[in-house]
Amino acid sequence: MDSTIGSLFRVFPSDPIMEQIGVIICSQRPRRAGPQIATFVLDTLKQYQAGHPSSRPYQFMLIDLAEHPLPMYDEPGIPSRIHSSAGYAHYHTRAWSDLINSFAAFVFVTPQYNWGYPAGLKNALDYLYHEWAGKPAMVVSYGGHGGHKAAMQLKQVLQGLHMKVVPHHVALQFPDREFMERASSGADLGLRVFNEAEPGERLWAQEGKDMHIVFALLLERLFGEADEEFGLRNIEGCACSDAQSHS
Ligand SMILES: Cc1cc2nc3c(=O)[nH]c(=O)nc-3n(C[C@H](O)[C@H](O)[C@H](O)COP(=O)(O)O)c2cc1C
């Protein structure tokens, strides 16, 4: 071990831990919209972070499911009975377990496929159990109608994994058919986070504000501290939904 790092830990034993929040790109297709939309989500959350300094340090990291391809579930055991990555039979599961273990909370950025979320995401979730359990999670969906159905189903599954799921999700609705075509082929969508200093029309400006509110609820679940300006106090005015039934 690097002795400098070791001595730093000894000198500042009470430094708060830098919590890692994983922003998961839930699509794995070649030429997909997922990375662009997840980057938009990430920038929106960083904007919240810059405007709302926290006494508890945290940072974001993108997790791209396409970079962690897993075969269809092939572990002989049941993940809920396995308490450390050494208990898995396969290297790919141990690597996935170690990665997910290193995060304290998750933001799932998922497309809607045929009224559900992608099968690859379900597979990636099913591989593990304790690595997810007890950790806060929020969902941002996207699609022709915003992907509400995918978001609703995903939140239910995350609850089954005993995650601390924010009940409200944010749905990013594609504005028109042409946008859908561009998204589906991975073309540039020109997404930019709304910024008060640069007024003007910006796609998903309201959804960006909603994302701040839902993220404040995620932080509340992570740190147990309510953000005075956001969170439950603002959720009433939020267009984000836990009960919509659009396709
Ligand atoms: C297999 C498949 C199923 C789809 N089903 C839906 C759907 O149910 N509702 C919808 O609004 N869009 C649907 N779409 C369109 C996606 O919203 C659009 O292709 C989007 O770009 C998918 O995200 P991705 O590019 O990150 O994979 C579907 C796309 C695919 C590939």
Image (tube, rainbow, N blue to C red):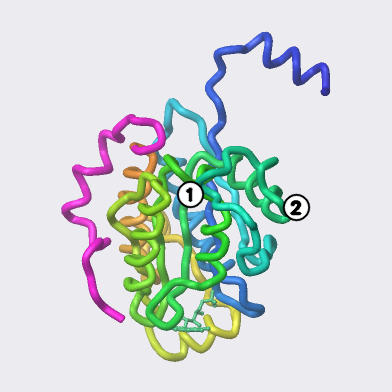
Q: Nearer the viewer, mark 1 or mark 2?
A: 2
Q: Which residues are magenta?
A: 221-247
Number of callouts: 2
Residue pushed farthest top? 11
**For residue 202, above or below residue 221:** below
Q: Residues within 10 Å of mark 1 (few under 14, many from 20)?
A: many
State the residue in front, 128 or 144.
128
Residue at 48% x, 43% y is 105
State the residue in front, 127 or 138.
127
Secondary structure at badge 2 equals helix
Residue 5's spot in the image, x, y percent?
76, 20
Is residue 235 within the magenta segment? yes
Q: Which mark is residue 23?
A: none
Is most of the magenta stretch helix, strand or loop?
loop
Residue 29's spot in the image, x, y percent?
62, 77
| Residue 138 falls left or right of residue 181 | left
Residue 12's spot in the image, x, y percent?
62, 12
Residue, disc 1: 106
Residue at 70% x, 41% y is 86
| Residue 202 falls left or right of residue 230 | right
Secondary structure at badge 1 equals strand
Residue, disc 2: 91
